[in-house]
Amino acid sequence: MNVLQLCYKPPYPPVDGGTLAMNSVTQGLMACGHKVKVLSVCSDKHPVKGEALEAGYKEATGFEAVYIDLSIHPLDAAVSLLCGESYNVKRFVSKEFDERLTAILQGESFDVVQVESIFLAPYVATVRKHSDAKVVLRAHNVEHRIWQQIATATHNPLKRWYLKKLALALRAYELEHIKALPALRPTTQRRSAAKAAANLWPTYPLALT
């Protein structure tokens, strides 16, 4: 099986929960004899650490990264708010990333494209346009719940109002897009409402209803 893994930040070296989760999939698939190509977003906060990338990893995964400016731009944030868009997701939309993804899909045939996190869901349309691969969304978190908690913990009334709007827009985006995907791979199973609220990793779609 040939798999294209789209990552929202460089998965290697694995230094935190997100990178550990993504790299474990990469390594597990390769250990089972599957071929994996990794295309990742990189940013100022999460750059590609060239000195930490092992030559063996780069060769085995054909690792590539495209820089996206994920910094907050007030004007873009205001426009997204007025249009009811999820600014959390919109920040990941990049012409350069889309073009590189298109080139990869046109140059190679894949059986599965695994999309790491809802933030890369905008690229599902590109995958479907240029490939017959099955698309799998791996849900690392119920992202809107994280933003709900941030909003609740914020004391500034205006900032709290804005963060609640962000959470609502992100919730709407998550609901819409997970229903449109053929497969969803949550990080953990939902065991109880209390535990799910604590660790923010319940199973879709139960956590969103």
Image (cartoon, helix red, strand yellow):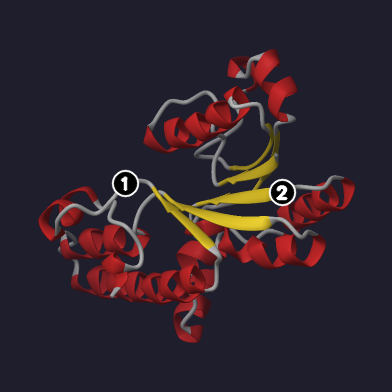
Residue 43, by quadrant, is: top right
Q: Residue furthest right?
A: 107
| Residue nearest the observer in this picture, 40 or 124 | 124
Q: Can residue 90 be seen by looking at this rendering? A: yes
Indicate the secondary structure of the residue bearing disc 1. Answer: loop
Label 2 vs label 1, nearer the camera: 2
- In x, y percent, where is residue 39? 68, 41
- Left or right: 29 as drawn, with respect to 111: left
Disc marking residue 38: none
Q: Earlier in the sequence, mark 2 or mark 1?
A: 2
Disc marking residue 188: 1
Residue type at mark 1 is Thr
- Left or right: 38 as drawn, with respect to 183: right
- Seen in the picture, residue 189 relative to 40 is either above or below; the reply is below
Residue type at mark 2 is Asp
- In x, y percent, where is residue 152? 17, 64
Q: Can residue 74 be seen by looking at this rendering? A: no
- In x, y percent, where is residue 15? 43, 26
- In x, y percent, where is residue 135? 62, 58
Residue under circle 2?
111
- Left or right: 19 as drawn, with respect to 198: right
Write the residue at 31% across / 70% down: 208
Write the residue at 28% across / 72% down: 164
Circle 2 Cα neighbour tier, 10 Å, few/some/many (<14 / 14–19 / ≥20) = some
| Residue nearest the observer in this picture, 38 or 31 | 31
Circle 1 Cα neighbour tier, 10 Å, few/some/many (<14 / 14–19 / ≥20) = some
Q: Which part of the image, by quadrant, shows the N terminus?
A: top right
Residue 146, by quadrant, is: bottom left
| Residue nearest the observer in this picture, 30 or 148 | 30
Q: Label 2 vs label 1: CA separation? A: 24 Å
Residue 127, by quadrant, is: bottom right
